Image: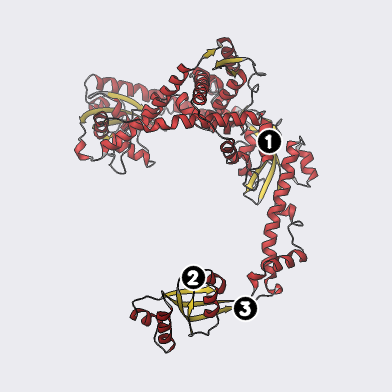
Amino acid sequence: MADVAPYGSATPNLLSDGTPMITFFRKALSSWIALGILALVMVAFIITGVETPGAMGGGGTGGTVAKVGGEKVGANELLRRAQNQIEGLRREQPGYDAKAFVAQGGFESVVEGLVGGRALEAWGKQQGFAISKRLIDAQIAGMAPFRGVTGQFDENVMRNMLAQARISERDLRADIGGDLLRNQILTPTAAIAVLPTKVASPYAALMLEQRIGSVGIIPLAAFIDPRQPTDAEIATAYKANIAAYTRPEARVLRYALFGPEQIAAAATPTEADIATYYRENAANYAARENRSLSQLITPNEALARSIAAQAKSGTPLAAAATKAGLEAVTLTDQNRDDYAKSAGAAVADQAFAVAKGGVAGPIKGSFGWYVVKVDSVTGTPARSLAQVRPEIVALLSTQKSQEALAELAGRIEDAIADGSSFAEIATGNKLSVIETPPLLANGQPVSAPPGWQAPPELNALLKGGFDGDPSDRPTVETVIKDQRFALLSVARVIPPTPVPLTQVRPLVIRDIVTKRAAARAKAVGDKVTAAVNRGVPLAKAMAESGAKLPAPAPARARQLDIARAQQGGGQIPAPVRALFALQKGKARLIPSDKGEALFVTVLETVVPGDLASAPGLVSEMRTELERALTPELGEQFVRAAGNAATIKRYPETIAAVKRQISGQ
């Protein structure tokens, strides 16, 4: 087993499962109260397709779950926030459900977070904290879900999304204002977490601790049974593991693309448009003259006159300036207007009146007396309308295309908000409708007509198509930013369906053979592990296992090296990680990440870490630990605010919401 070599910058050490120790601390020391109420993510969940109150198990419960300082906390609000949390976890962990959320204590965390947040809000208002309407407006305007096809905030989009989520603008503003107020109160607590160096030193030493051992490899391939399973065994295994042979949910998507083709006529500029643009921007097409100049500025006229006389008689201006203790500067590609803004109109007039090689001055200008020599002259002739017409047509076409496309998208979004169906909108805007064959969430077709290939726009539509439902209103999805969009709806949902045994028979046989081999390998692995834990050397225990196994391999690592490797995207073998979960002289049976082998890891030696070998590590560990303490301080502050407020909970209503969440 190869050593894990040190590289990179210092990072936290790991627990036995590979979790960074600081991450573990943060999870252990924090809670939803301290972390969950500090972000506007909750509001983002509300407006991006999360089920609204009543969508999980019937209508809202109604009633009051708590009173904080005289203000009611409604059951529907608790239900909504719990659903938001579940949806957020589901996006990170597909398959996560409400029952798991309740079983893991998530519901209670939401209750405490909601009540604690309201208590903190009440305390802040008593102390004079306030959030302005302008600040809330800025937060709303910056929310990505409220942007229209132009990428800018669109009030119609906001109102449409809020209507779909059944959230009033007043509730949205209250959520945002509350989050901003709590942030305003709790942010300063992050600055007061200070940890002594003596506390950080032991953790830094653990990161440098080196563990040395051996790893015995037990490959499943060594235990393959050549006998083929019987038909009865195959049928039994198929039924027992039917979930593994079930095709996931599939969907038929219906969409209509719209882009430049739909607005081509409106995007074509007229002759009047072209002439008007040329007239209004005539300065851009007029004759232009640029000059490169050598310029000298003096504090008085007499000195300027003397230097100008020398320059006009043939002495280089730079030399004449140096002789007087001054320095000339070179200005390249100057036009009259820009030069006049810096030097003054009088200086520009004379500098652009003399020929190439001529000297102008002395002239009184913006910063003193000027002497200017013309080094070079370049001219650009005027361009007629006929010459610049293609350029203007291209520019106006792009501009009018964007405006027309934004107008079309606006009409479609307005129609959606007004309740028009997909078919009505497509017909009303003369859009061609495309319907896909049944697709999995990754875009793979379950069944498709011969020769069917996924169109290029499909990837942009999959997420929206699988987030929605046939009963939902159509949505507008971006296919190519600012260029092409799609009106999208879900035509049909095909539930998960078991694949017939005849089609998956080879897979079932493979799984049976693999399961048999895994059972035999585990029996041998348990035997070897038990022998090592009784004091038998690993090499001897494997040799006496009764199976032909490879010789053990050496393994060694420091926690610091593992953390650095993982930070850089490296994969640390499971048996190496196991070294940090063992006592000296003990062994553990570890499955491989891919299931193709088992490993017997033995820890043989522990070398203590030497802080002198890693200067600065203690300081870095201290910073990490201080970050871990910050959530705890925030939680304590919230609890203190809760103690200062009058809080009354209504257990029966809370229990009713919990039952609704869990589907009871």
Q: In which image quadrant can residue 387 be found?
A: bottom right
Q: Nearer the viewer, mark 1 or mark 2?
A: 2
Residue 327 location (% of width, % of height) = 37, 75
Residue tagged 3: 381
Label 2 sits on what residue type? Ser
Name, please, the residue furthest toward the top.
Answer: 652
The answer to whether the residues at label 1 and label 3 have Cβ atoms under 8 Å apart is no
Along the line of sight, the residue nearer the viewer: 533 or 92:
92
Question: Which is more N-terminal, label 2 or label 1?
Answer: 1
Q: Which label number is shown at residue 396?
A: none
Residue tagged 1: 159
Quick check: 3 left or right of 271?
left
SS assignment at label 3: loop
Quick check: 622 left or right of 35?
left
Q: Residue shown at 57%/32% (left/top)?
A: 176
Tell me: residue 200, above or below residue 237: below
Question: Which is more N-terminal, label 3 or label 2?
Answer: 2
C-alpha distance separating marks 1 and 3: 53 Å
The answer to whether the residues at label 2 and label 3 have Cβ atoms under 8 Å apart is no
Q: Residue shown at 63%/41% (left/top)?
A: 461
Question: Which is more N-terminal, label 3 or label 1?
Answer: 1
SS assignment at label 2: loop
Q: Residue shown at 62%/46% (left/top)?
A: 152
Name, please, the residue furthest toward the bottom.
Answer: 313
Q: Which label number is shown at residue 366?
A: 2
